[in-house]
Amino acid sequence: MNKRSIGIPIQLMAIVLFGCTMAQQSDQARKSNVQFMPMESDNRIYYEPRAENIARIVASYLPESIATVERELQRPFVKPVQVKIFESADSFAAVTDVSKQEWGVMISGTVFLSGLVKTAPDDHIKALLTHELVHLYLQQRLGVSERHPTLPMWFEEGLAELVSGGSAMAMVTEPEATRAIMAGQHFFSDAAGGLVHPERCKYGLESHMFYRQAEMFVAYLQSLDGTKFQSLLLALADGHDFEGSWRSILGFSLHDAWQKFMGELESRARDPLNKERR
């Protein structure tokens, strides 16, 4: 098979599901002249010239990352996965309208990875890929126009971190995140979603701190009742809204869950044997 370069016009009319860029919409389609090469060994992956080495690493992890998402969230992807890899942070930012400091984003059913990933350890690349695939899975399962916008950002990002093993875990330790929460520097765990609900921006949290706190809270929710938590994931995968599914399946309020979570963090902080985890 001969490689051919294809120009991919990228429509940014849909939701950007990443940090403070979530819910950006454009009245005009933004088009890119970036040329992507299809990967011969895996037609789900496209890459910019000089990004082939990154593409090979991503290709080596893609099957396992897809399997992890489908296993943990208990349903298969609805549509084929597509990943596009940029050679630099500049081209990534220019096309996606996302900060050059971000490593990846999912837009309009495609995972985009920045050239920044070439500086990352392989396990970080794997975690980032899996994280973005969780966003893709949720978009495919819940859609972008109706129920998906009701999914709270803290839950989506926390779930993506929990499933992927979390790139944020290497940047922010659990004790660091705990100290911030105890100091009142945390997101608000409500059930609201919507196209404009950027908790990370509203509460002034740095991205990795937000992801770490969200992962800790989602992991705590899972620990309260693993069976019911899995039922919640299945309900979401089947297209049900978050707030209604939460009420009918879990049987306790988010407020009560957050208060219990805070109590557990306080208990850990008082434990002199408490050590940094993960």
Image (spheres, helix red, strand yellow):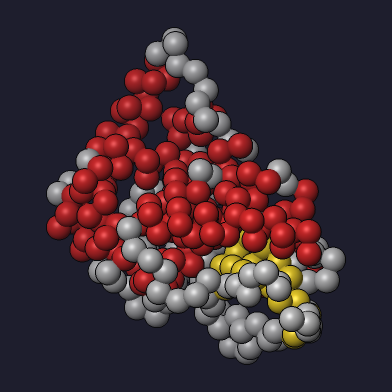
Residue 46, quarter of the rendered image: bottom right
Q: Is residue 32 visible?
A: no
Residue 15 as seen in the image, left or right of residue 192: right
Q: Nearer the viewer, residue 278 or 121?
A: 121
Residue 247 as seen in the image, left or right of residue 203: left
Q: Nearer the viewer, residue 103 or 130?
A: 130
Q: Is residue 269 above or below residue 9?
A: above
**Residue drawn at point x = 40 percent, y = 80 percent:** 145
Q: Is residue 235 visible?
A: yes
Q: Is residue 237 above or below residue 10?
A: above
Q: Quadrant of the N terminus?
A: bottom right
Q: Residue furthest right?
A: 50
**Residue drawn at point x = 45 percent, y = 57 percent:** 67
Residue 211 on image: x %, y %: 51, 47
Residue 265 on image: x %, y %: 38, 27
**Residue drawn at point x = 68 percent, y = 46 percent:** 122
